[in-house]
Image (cartoon, helix red, strand yellow):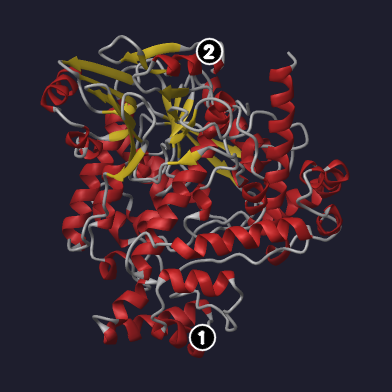
């Protein structure tokens, strides 16, 4: 098992055979958190102290796992009101925080994560792979469940992970046979015998009818509640202070509850990057803040330290490329006594919105859409002809997906109004892998459904879920028994507040992140409110690639993906002979490199578990 993050749990149906799963979990620190009324185990795993809460009332057993504002009395009152699994539908948004919710009601099991995908649920059948009638169990990590089920890797799904961003729902497919993911915003329900799994939605995005002013008030309250949940108690905490509006908002709110908060700012020696300057300006108004500024040279280089990488996330992810740097930040936080580190990740996806909203806007406010399109074309230097064709395109998601999967899209896609990104097949895929990927794309096209009826809304939800997935995997890379990262912007109530705002007010080419400016106007330093620049780190990425590319090229000489018959290492090796450019070395190349590192680490750790 690729054991990166320390915390994990399984949720089990009320059946005698399910308890066998507990014996296949990591051996250290496993405990039973919740039992069915029958006395059989319901939830077991390695769980963080102080981040679990359970209540028992009559035939109902209820547990929350994670950061949650609920008190013991509030959870007990909720358990007393529950007579059926559907009665839990409102609890995902009832309390601030980010948490799993698990319930046993008259022996029936319900397990749910979050709408953002930051907390996931996976399920599969316990027993020999493919054995008919086997009972279903759930887990919060795909690799933990795969180990418990002894599930083999699926070559087709692993090949997909070597591509760049995948269209919905392909990014949600775990790379093991027999391991399925519950979509974000849905829950898994099981009867006591565990043999009829049911997946149903509990969350729907709110109707976007709120004004920017009202939305700012809602966001301020939701974000403050999210931060307050993390700052309770006396345990030392820390936070990123990058200089951007997202991390600055988190720090300003956290400092109200913890004035002596420790914050970290990385100073880039690239003179075009002004992040540290803005971070100092924000910190100047917080006299009790322990503000630590350090040079980017004190962190491992981009693409550095990857050859000996261990402890990877539960699925292939480009997050592994940041593992040495993330762990170095963890080391700094631990050195200052912190056990919880807050960041502003997810804010960009919530606050910037997707330009495909112009496609939606054209259909009910065409003059405003035309004005915005003119500005966006100038900013992005895109073609009027391409954008106009995209705006007039009325194809359904399924038709769009099928056209792309079958190669029927002869014209360039419109970045402002397309349904999303559709990957090309890179030259390093073997013929067998290309066939596997093509077959998966064709099969998916038959039933593909969007996340929302309109393109802007669909792309917004897709971006949020992709952020939830990536941030979750970053958290797994730094998690230990007594340390974790946390991202308040990806709390469901924060997402709810943002998506309730009318998109034409939340997403505008004339202003950068107007919603967070409205929400934080009374405490954000004026200079930060007017900032329009954002450091992107491209220079550091290029420099790190140049320093490490020859060493990384050696990965392909003994490629795990090549041994599985998925890639031809030659074209990938050649890329590492070339100087870094965004067009060649972002996207698919980084996905392939990440997948190779993940597959190697997973194989090594599986072998170690088999032959200790």
Helix, strand or loop status at disc 1: helix
Helix, strand or loop status at disc 2: helix
In this view, 560 is above or below 14: below
Q: Which of the image's four quarters has the C terminus?
A: top right
In this view, 396 is above or below 29: below
Q: Quadrant of residue 94?
A: top left
Q: Is residue 581 visible?
A: yes
Badge nearest the viewer, 2 or 1: 2
Q: Which residue is identified by label 2?
A: 23
- Given residues 159 and 196, the one toward you in this image is 196
Q: Quadrant of residue 528?
A: bottom left
- Give percent across and percent down for residue 80: 12, 22
- Give percent across and percent down for residue 81: 11, 27
- Give percent across and percent down for residue 132: 50, 33
Between discs 2 and 1, the one toward the N terminus = 2
In this view, 594 is above or below 164: above
In this view, 547 is above or below 151: below
Direction bottom: furthest residue: 385
Q: Quadrant of residue 406?
A: bottom right
Q: Which of the image's four quarters has the N terminus?
A: top right
Disc number at residue 386? 1
The residue at 43%/75% (across/down) is 417
- Given residues 333 and 146, the one toward you in this image is 146
Q: Is residue 315 left or right of residue 120?
A: right
Q: CA distance from mark 2 to mark 1?
A: 57 Å
Q: Is residue 540 visible?
A: no
- Give percent across and percent down for residue 284: 39, 41
The residue at 45%/23% (across/down) is 9
Label 2 neighbour load within 10 Å: few <14, some 14-19, many 20+: few
């Amino acid at each position: 098992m690729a054991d990166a993050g320390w915390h994990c749990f399984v949720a089990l149906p009320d059946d005698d055979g399910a308890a066998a799963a507990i014996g296949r979990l990591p051996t250290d620190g496993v405990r039973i958190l919740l039992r069915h009324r029958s006395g059989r185990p319901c939830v077991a795993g390695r769980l963080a102290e102080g981040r679990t809460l359970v209540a028992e009332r009559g035939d109902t057993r209820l547990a929350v796992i994670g950061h949650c504002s609920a008190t013991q009395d509030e959870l007990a009152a909720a358990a007393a009101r529950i007579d059926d699994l559907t009665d839990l539908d409102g609890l995902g948004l009832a309390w601030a925080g980010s948490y799993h919710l698990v319930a046993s009601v008259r022996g029936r099991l319900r397990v749910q994560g979050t709408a953002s995908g930051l907390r996931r649920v996976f399920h599969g059948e316990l027993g020999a792979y493919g054995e008919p009638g086997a009972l279903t169990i759930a887990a919060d990590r795909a690799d933990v469940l795969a180990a418990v089920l002894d599930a083999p890797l699926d070559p087709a799904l692993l090949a997909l992970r070597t591509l760049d961003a995948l269209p919905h729902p392909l990014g949600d497919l775990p790379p093991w046979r027999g391991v399925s993911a519950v979509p974000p915003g849905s829950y898994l329900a099981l009867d006591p015998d565990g043999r009829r799994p049911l997946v149903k939605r509990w969350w729907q995005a709110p109707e976007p009818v709120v004004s920017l002013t009202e939305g700012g008030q809602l966001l301020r309250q939701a974000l403050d509640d999210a931060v307050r949940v993390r700052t309770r108690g006396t345990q030392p905490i820390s936070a990123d202070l990058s200089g951007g509006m997202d991390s600055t908002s988190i720090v300003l709110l956290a400092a109200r509850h913890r004035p002596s908060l420790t914050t970290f700012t990385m100073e880039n020696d690239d003179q075009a990057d002004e992040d540290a300057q803005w971070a100092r300006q924000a910190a100047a108004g917080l006299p009790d803040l322990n503000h630590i500024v350090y040079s980017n040279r004190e962190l491992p280089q981009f693409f550095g330290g990857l050859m000996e990488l261990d402890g990877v996330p539960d699925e292939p992810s480009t997050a592994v490329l940041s593992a040495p740097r993330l762990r170095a930040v963890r080391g700094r936080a631990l050195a200052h006594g912190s056990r919880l580190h807050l960041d502003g990740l997810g804010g960009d996806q919530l606050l910037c919105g997707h330009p495909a909203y112009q496609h939606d806007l054209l259909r009910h406010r065409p003059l405003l859409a035309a004005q915005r399109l003119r500005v966006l074309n100038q900013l992005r230097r895109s073609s009027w002809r391409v954008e106009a064709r995209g705006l007039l395109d009325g194809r359904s998601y399924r038709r769009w997906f099928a056209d792309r999967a079958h190669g029927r899209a002869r014209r360039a896609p419109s970045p402002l109004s397309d349904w999303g990104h559709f990957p090309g097949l890179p030259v390093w895929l073997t013929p067998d892998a290309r066939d596997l990927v093509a077959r998966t794309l064709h099969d998916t096209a038959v039933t593909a459904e969007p996340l929302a009826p309109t393109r802007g809304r669909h792309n917004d939800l897709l971006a949020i879920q992709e952020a939830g997935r990536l941030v979750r995997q970053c958290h797994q890379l730094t998690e230990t028994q007594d340390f974790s990262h946390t991202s308040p912007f990806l709390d469901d109530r924060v997402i709810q507040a943002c998506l309730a705002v009318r998109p034409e007010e939340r997403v505008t080419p004339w202003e950068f992140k107007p919603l967070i400016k409205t929400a934080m106007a009374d405490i954000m330093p004026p200079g930060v409110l007017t900032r329009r620049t954002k450091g992107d780190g491209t220079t550091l990425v290029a420099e790190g690639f140049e320093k490490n590319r020859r060493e990384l090229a050696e990965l392909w000489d003994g490629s795990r993906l090549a041994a599985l018959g998925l890639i031809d290492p030659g074209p990938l090796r050649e890329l590492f002979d070339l100087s870094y450019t965004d067009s060649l070395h972002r996207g698919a190349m980084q996905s392939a490199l990440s997948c190779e590192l993940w597959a190697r680490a997973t194989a090594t750790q599986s072998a170690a578990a088999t032959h200790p």
